[in-house]
């Protein structure tokens, strides 16, 4: 199973969000090879839109297996008086996955390891699978995590994707428990995907820029 995680970040309005999903589902329906890979659990797509669109997209995906929803963050607090926070409890049943510790959260919102570990606990409490992001081998991560996303900061959104050699070297350096799904993120697109397509070490991809336009995201999926 290869994972393609579409991280929309803080983009799109309601109409754009719905159109993106409609087009993706139409394009997949017409591509029998890709449809088969999805149906047979060789490919899984995890769409991570902003919170306000989760509910409508969830309904659109109700008949689709292996196209699932994730959120890009969640609160470290359990339910309570925390104005503006989105608690894991509110997301339970809506998302299956949560990206936690993206470098943009660490940089712009000063999220610390301590806070991120709390978020992981909170996600798990409400049966949401954390996808924990690290920037390099110095970032600590919960040892019992199932999904670890390696995203070197210089490669994010810059077009400077990290070489496949460096990505696999990092996987070795981390000496991961084999049950952990190792995800790479950083300027993956339909032009450079072939660099990574044969790597057995890499279980999936976290995709930002290349999922802004649904046609580019589909191009990437259809060459997998
Ligand atoms: P990018 O973003 O594909 O634009 O580099 C990846 C990410 O931030 O998860």
Image (cartoon, rainbow, N blue to C red):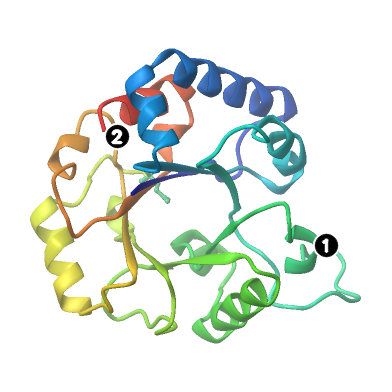
In the picture, the disc for residue 84 is: 1
Residue under numbered circle 2: 189
Confirm or deny contact between disc 2 and disc 1 (CB under 8 A): no
Which SS class for mark 1? loop
Q: Nearer the viewer, mark 2 or mark 1?
A: 2
Rendered residue at 78%/65% (across/down): 85
Residue 127: name its quadrant: bottom right
Which SS class for mark 2? loop
Which residue, as the protein is rendered here, is positioned at the far top?
A: 30
Q: Is residue 14 left or right of residue 127?
A: right
Q: Is residue 100 above or below residue 62?
A: below
Rendered residue at 29%/34% (across/down): 189
Which residue, as the protein is rendered here, is positioned at the far front?
A: 40
Q: Point out residue 1 in the picture as x, y percentages from the top left corner.
A: 33, 49
Q: Is residue 210 above or below residue 222?
A: below
Marks 2 and 1 sit apart, C-alpha to C-alpha, by 34 Å
Q: Is residue 121 left or right of residue 91?
A: left
How packed is label 1: few (under 14 Cα within 10 Å), some, or many (20 or more)? few
Q: Is residue 176 above or below residue 55?
A: below
Disc 2 C-beta below 8 A from ligand 1: yes
Q: Point out residue 110 in the picture as x, y percentages from the top left corner.
A: 56, 73
Q: Point out residue 34 in the picture as x, y percentages from the top left corner.
A: 36, 26
Q: Point out residue 192 in the picture as x, y percentages from the top left corner.
A: 19, 35
């Amino acid at each position: 199973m290869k994972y393609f995680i579409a991280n929309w970040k803080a983009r799109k309005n309601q109409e754009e969000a719905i159109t993106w999903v409609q087009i993706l589902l139409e394009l997949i329906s017409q591509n029998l090879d890709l449809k088969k890979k999805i149906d047979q659990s060789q490919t899984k797509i995890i769409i991570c839109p902003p919170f306000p669109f989760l509910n409508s997209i969830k309904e659109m995906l109700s008949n689709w297996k292996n196209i699932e929803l994730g959120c890009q963050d969640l609160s470290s607090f359990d339910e309570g008086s925390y104005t503006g926070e989105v608690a894991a409890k509110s997301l339970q049943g809506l998302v299956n996955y949560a990206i936690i510790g993206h470098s943009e959260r660490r940089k712009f919102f000063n999220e610390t390891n301590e806070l991120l570990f709390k978020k992981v606990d909170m996600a798990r409490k409400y049966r949401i699978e954390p996808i924990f992001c690290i920037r390099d081998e110095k970032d600590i991560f919960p040892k019992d995590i199932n999904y670890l996303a390696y995203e070197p900061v210089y490669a994010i959104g810059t077009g400077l994707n990290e070489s496949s050699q460096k990505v696999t070297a990092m996987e070795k350096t981390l000496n991961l428990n084999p049950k952990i799904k190792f995800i790479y993120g950083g300027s993956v697109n339909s032009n450079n995907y072939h660099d990574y397509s044969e790597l057995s070490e890499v279980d999936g991809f976290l995709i930002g820029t290349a999922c802004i336009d649904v046609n580019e995201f589909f191009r990437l999926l259809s060459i997998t």
